[in-house]
Image (cartoon, grey):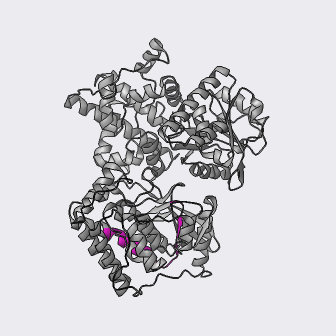
């Protein structure tokens, strides 16, 4: 069956341009859409470019098959879904066209006028521009409302971030669909308002400019500045190395030059962005192929403490000035900018860096940089900051329903599959409390970002940091408090389980008043804590048996069995299953109906349950017998004495677990060898 999302169905997708990025975009489309029978065509006027692009993509697919990333049949299917042609007539019938030609405004305009004559009036037209405003690119279209910029990042098939930039005439429903579509195919889609360079490239190119200025001002050599930038910015490669990897010298020169022109305002007629002499001289002498002299793999640069600190201060001042200056424009939210930078550029976001330095120190660094670089403005957004900056990982938006709103809370930590840390737990509790206090809100839906995970579990870093039993108890107390606050909320809270819900994620869902889930997932839900040498700590040992029955619950807890969507439905863990694109709507409808009193959501039983005097026999495999004994004791205590006694027993049990050798063995094995490794438990 074809790929359908909301009102649009895709059978045929086209990419124009077989240069640096077009084939990679096509490869990503083919990987995610070929299971639906979608064909992907790459069109270019140059046969040589097509042949080179196809050869590069075939090499990537073959390598994926060799490493096990693709099964052989999947690799063959991806190749079969891809076509490379010089025939623009192959665009006919495409429901989605992405242009990835050279960053030339006139060229892009001509391409889209030709494309518009070949495709249907409802075909979505996207430009993979890195800088140009959609109003300029699509100025010649008869139907610009079906166009937008989709800015991919290098490498396009693997970098998850994509900026979705709507123009003044872009249909708002189209932008909303694009954000949903790209999330559905595995991207992190970031909405950005139209402005030259959008939100992320001014940071990438501005940091490179700042690094050039460090060299020009004698703070260090190219190699020294590039190496020092790694620690300063929390990146694995410095700005000069990044430019070598992306071949970005020419486009950065072009971009910085136009930023200087287009960022100018009456209040700030000479913005800081400009082409540094170091870059201009490099291109004049060596052309686009010129490489910067940086450390080779494994090499380091010996930078003395004093010049290193001066380089760090300059880069911090420039980086924070650029980032908070972008927030001043209002083209992107602080949460989206933080996420985009951390994922697209793989570096510490501005809020996290400012918090690490201290916001007063961060402001002082920007002010000091601006004092020696007068064209750099000191952003109002940073000047107005008081104390630590909250980095939102729980994103709220309201959905209008009859007589009010349903507040959808999305847990968004895609880098760790939405895993829960203390900060995210606190944000969930705060968001639920705010919804409870808002008279316009009828109910709440809790879900996860993306299509892979609701919540993958508790952040393993927090467990790895446990040094004493009391530390473990404190973690469990936090989880229990948040889950209990959801459980006793007076307005309905419905979990929309959009992907795997493991460990703390399932415990969070169990505390909700109802659960609906995505259909067709082989590994949807489970409490795998015993695989790590621990037990659930946020109420899972008590709520799961109350929901699915003692026999099933205890078996699932002791064996860490994972349930599919169908199994979760059969056991009563979830109320209903839905296609991915309909899940959130179904959750909102259920929450709204419950909020109006039209649907009853029965609470979990709080009292004692029927339970045997001893736990039934169960093959727990390689897992710790010491942990199993505590787990069984905790579950049976709750069954005999009621939910509240059981939750107290779970806290005590979790604290006792953290004194066992097996807890440390399990966590260390996970950290060092990954989740598939079996710990060598000593049962003590």
Q: Is residue 524 left or right of residue 26?
A: left
Residue 577: image location, x then y, percent: 60, 67
- Residue at image position (75%, 30%) is 88
In magenta, the rendered stretch is 476-499
Closer-to-camera residue (226/560): 560
Above or below — where is 479 with respect to 186? below
Residue 331 vertical placement versus 318 (above, below): below
In the image, residue 18 sits, relative to residue 678, either above or below, namely above
Q: Quadrant of residue 347?
A: top left
**Furthest-top residue in this view:** 285
Q: Can I make out residue 447 in this image? A: yes
Name the spot of residue 625 as percent of width and height, x first.
Answer: 29, 68
Q: Which residue: 34% across, 45% down?
A: 353
Q: Could you say which is closer to the camera, residue 91 or residue 174? A: 91
**Horizontal side of residue 121 vs 281, given as left or right:** right
Q: What is the quadrant of residue 598 in the picture?
A: bottom right
Image quadrant where residue 241 sits: top left
Tell whether position 494 is magenta: yes
Query: In which quadrant will I find the C terminus?
Result: bottom left
- Numbered-mark total: 0
Given residues 640 and 118, the one toward you in this image is 640
Q: Is residue 188 magenta?
A: no
Q: Is residue 367 among what the camera can see?
A: no
Residue 650 position, x and y percent, is 31, 75
Identify whether 51 is placed above or below 619.
above
């Amino acid at each position: 069956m074809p790929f359908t999302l909301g009102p649009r169905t895709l059978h045929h997708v086209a990419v124009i341009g077989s240069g640096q990025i077009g084939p990679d975009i096509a490869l990503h489309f083919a990987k995610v859409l070929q299971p639906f029978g979608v064909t992907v065509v790459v069109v270019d006027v140059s046969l040589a470019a097509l042949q080179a692009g196809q050869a590069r993509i075939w090499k990537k697919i073959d390598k994926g098959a060799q490493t096990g990333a693709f099964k052989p049949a999947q690799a063959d299917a991806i190749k079969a879904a891809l076509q490379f042609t010089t025939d623009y007539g192959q665009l006919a019938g495409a429901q989605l066209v992405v242009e990835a030609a050279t960053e030339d405004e006139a060229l892009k305009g001509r391409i889209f006028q030709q494309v518009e004559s070949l495709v249907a009036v409802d075909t979505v037209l996207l430009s993979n521009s890195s800088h140009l405003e959609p109003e300029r690119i699509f100025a010649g279209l008869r139907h610009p409302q079906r166009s937008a910029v989709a800015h991919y990042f290098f490498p396009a098939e693997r970098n998850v971030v994509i900026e979705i930039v709507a123009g003044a005439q872009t249909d708002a429903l189209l932008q909303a669909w694009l954000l949903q579509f790209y999330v559905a195919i595995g991207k992190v889609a970031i909405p950005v308002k139209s402005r030259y360079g959008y939100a992320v490239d001014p940071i990438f190119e501005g940091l490179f400019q700042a690094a050039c200025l460090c060299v020009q001002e004698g703070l260090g050599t190219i190699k020294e500045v590039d190496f020092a930038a790694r620690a300063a910015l929390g990146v694995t490669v410095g700005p000069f190395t990044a430019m070598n990897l992306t071949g970005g010298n020419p486009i950065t020169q072009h971009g910085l030059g136009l930023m200087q022109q287009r960022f100018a305002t009456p209040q700030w007629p000479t913005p800081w962005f400009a082409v540094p002499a170091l870059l201009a001289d490099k291109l004049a002498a060596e052309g686009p192929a010129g490489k910067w002299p940086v450390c080779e793999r494994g090499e380091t640069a010996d930078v003395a403490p004093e010049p290193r600190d001066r380089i760090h201060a300059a880069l911090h001042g420039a980086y924070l000035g650029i980032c908070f200056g972008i927030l001043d424009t209002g083209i992107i939210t602080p949460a989206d900018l933080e996420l985009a930078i951390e994922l697209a550029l793989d570096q510490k976001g501005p809020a996290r860096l400012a918090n690490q330095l201290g916001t007063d120190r961060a402001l002082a660094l920007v002010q000091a940089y601006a004092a020696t670089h007068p064209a750099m403005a000191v952003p109002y957004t940073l000047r107005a900051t008081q104390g630590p900056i909250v980095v939102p990982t729980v994103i709220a938006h309201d959905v209008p329903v009859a007589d009010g709103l349903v507040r959808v809370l999305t847990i968004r930590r895609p880098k760790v599959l939405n895993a829960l840390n203390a900060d995210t737990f606190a944000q969930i509790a705060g968001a639920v409390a705010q919804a409870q206090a808002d008279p316009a809100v009828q109910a709440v839906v809790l879900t996860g970002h993306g299509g892979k995970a609701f919540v993958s579990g508790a952040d393993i870093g927090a467990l790895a940091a446990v040094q004493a039993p009391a530390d473990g108890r404190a973690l469990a107390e936090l989880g229990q408090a948040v889950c209990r606050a959801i459980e006793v909320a007076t307005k309905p809270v419905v979990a929309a389980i959009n992907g795997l819900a493991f460990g703390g994620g399932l415990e969070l869902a169990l505390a909700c008043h109802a659960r609906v889930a995505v259909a067709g997932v082989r590994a949807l839900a489970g409490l795998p804590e015993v695989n790590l040498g621990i037990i659930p700590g946020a109420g899972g040992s008590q709520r799961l048996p109350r929901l699915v029955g003692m026999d099933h619950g205890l078996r699932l807890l002791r064996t860490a069995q994972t349930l599919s969507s169908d199994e979760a439905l059969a056991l009563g863990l979830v109320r209903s299953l839905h296609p991915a694109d309909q899940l959130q709507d179904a959750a909102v409808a259920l929450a709204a109906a419950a909020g109006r009193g039209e649907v009853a959501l029965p609470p979990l039983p709080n009292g004692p349950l029927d339970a045997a005097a001893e736990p039934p026999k169960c093959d727990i495999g390689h897992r710790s017998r010491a942990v199993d004994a505590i787990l069984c004791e905790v579950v049976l205590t709750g069954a005999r004495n009621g939910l509240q006694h059981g939750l107290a027993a779970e806290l005590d049990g979790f604290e006792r677990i953290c004194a066992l050798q097996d807890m440390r063995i399990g966590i260390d094995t996970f950290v060092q060898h990954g989740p598939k490794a079996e710990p060598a438990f000593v049962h003590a």
